[in-house]
Image: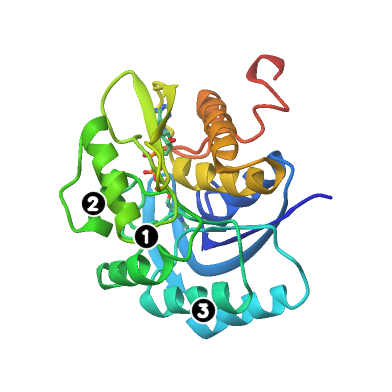
């Protein structure tokens, strides 16, 4: 049976990040995509010019209506915007018994624009980090969640991933896209075992808009179809690397462009 995969996230009209990226990823990886919107953004590859939040009660109404009808096999959570929406999503996770929850604690877009109010970071840490089955922070988000400085190397990443487990995360995929070097390495940490590294060649492209959205969505889509999070993360990372490899084939704008979701179906050479 095709798994139902739900994204709870914001809209990106350029199609590179947010629910648009999430739904493309779910489809490409064998999931049936569903979406609950938390905010509209006025956004292109060049940046975000506005955010129009969905009221928390209406986020909850979307969730209650959908989940009273459909069984969801995995959930990806992205942009939430403010504390009220975070609290609404946290209580819906409990009330509906949601499982295979992947939290991408989106705070700032690649363009530098804020997508989460600064005063809402504590609510993400206290309400959502312990409820998620996996959190996927990048290095600035990890630092914000811990109230620490941003780290810049793998040993310091291992230590921070451990401290994210200490504050209540069940599993952490700490993403190293912001590191320098020839490879782009992410660390998967679970309590009781040493962190596993997932490394890929660092591709020479400026088109990295939506990489975090794509990776977390790929993990959510694959988790119900694979044995465990390790297998889902391994394959999701490969999917993202190929999507990045073909990113320069797209022509979605002048700024940081999106990654290519249908690389597997239509490789660049056949165009
Ligand atoms: N140039 C690149 N080449 C290959 N992988 C990359 C590149 N940039 C980012 N990644 C990968 O994309 C994913 C998201 O990376 P990151 O930039 O850390 O997060 P975010 O998109 O949330 O800021 C990670 O798996 C990271 O390793
Ligand atoms: C609606 C929405 N959600 C998430 C992101 C983050 O994506 P990125 O960090 O790749 O810009 C975004 N730009 N827009």
Where does residue 30 sit, x and y in percent of width and height? Answer: 74, 42
The residue sitting at the right extreme is: 1
Nearest to the observer: residue 252 or residue 158:
158
Look at the image and tell me whether residue 24 can be seen: no
- Are there few (<14), some (14-19), or many (20+) residues within 10 Å of tag 2? some
Helix, strand or loop under label 1: strand
Number of marks: 3
The residue sitting at the left extreme is: 149
Tell me if residue 199 comes above or below residue 119 in the rendering. above
The residue sitting at the top extreme is: 269
Q: Which residue is drawn at 62% across and 71% down?
A: 97
Where does residue 144 sit, x and y in percent of width and height? Answer: 24, 57
The residue sitting at the front extreme is: 192
The circle drawn on residue 91 is 3
Is the C terminus in the top left, top right, bottom left or bottom right quadrant?
top right
The response on whether ligand 2 sits within 8 Å of label 1 is no
Question: In the picture, residue 218 is in which quadrant?
Answer: top right
Helix, strand or loop under label 2: helix
Per the model, the C-alpha gap separating discs 2 and 3 is 26 Å
Helix, strand or loop under label 3: helix
Q: Quadrant of ligand 1?
A: top left
Nearest to the observer: residue 266 or residue 155:
155
Residue under numbered circle 2: 143
Label 1–label 3 contact, CB within 8 A: no
Label 2–label 3 contact, CB within 8 A: no
The circle drawn on residue 49 is 1
N-terminal of the pair, mark 1 or mark 2, is: 1
């Amino acid at each position: 049976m095709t798994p139902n995969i739900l994204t709870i996230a914001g809209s990106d009209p350029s199609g590179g990040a947010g629910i648009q990226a999430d739904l493309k990823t779910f489809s490409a990886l064998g999931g049936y995509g569903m979406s609950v919107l938390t905010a509209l953004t006025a956004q292109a590859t060049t940046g975000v010019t506005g955010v129009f939040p969905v009221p928390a009660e209406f986020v909850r109404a979307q969730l209650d209506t959908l989940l009273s009808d459909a069984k969801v096999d995995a959930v990806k959570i992205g942009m939430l915007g403010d504390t009220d929406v975070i609290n609404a999503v946290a209580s819906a996770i409990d009330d509906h018994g949601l499982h295979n929850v992947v939290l991408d604690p989106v705070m700032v877009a690649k363009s530098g624009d804020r997508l989460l109010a600064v005063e809402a970071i504590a609510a993400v840490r206290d309400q959502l980090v312990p409820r998620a089955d996996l959190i996927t922070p990048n290095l600035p988000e990890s630092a914000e969640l811990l109230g620490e400085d941003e780290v810049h190397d793998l040993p310091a990443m291992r230590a921070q991933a451990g401290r994210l487990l200490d504050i209540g995360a069940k599993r952490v995929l700490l993403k190293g896209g912001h590191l320098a070097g020839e490879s782009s390495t992410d660390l998967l940490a679970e309590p009781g075992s040493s962190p596993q590294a997932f490394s890929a060649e660092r591709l020479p492209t400026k088109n990295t808009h939506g990489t975090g959205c794509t990776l977390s969505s790929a993990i959510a889509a694959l988790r119900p179809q694979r044995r465990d999070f390790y297998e889902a993360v391994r394959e999701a990372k490969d999917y993202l690397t190929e999507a990045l490899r073909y990113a320069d084939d797209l022509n979605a704008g002048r700024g940081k462009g999106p990654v290519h979701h249908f690389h597997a179906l239509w490789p660049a050479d056949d165009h």
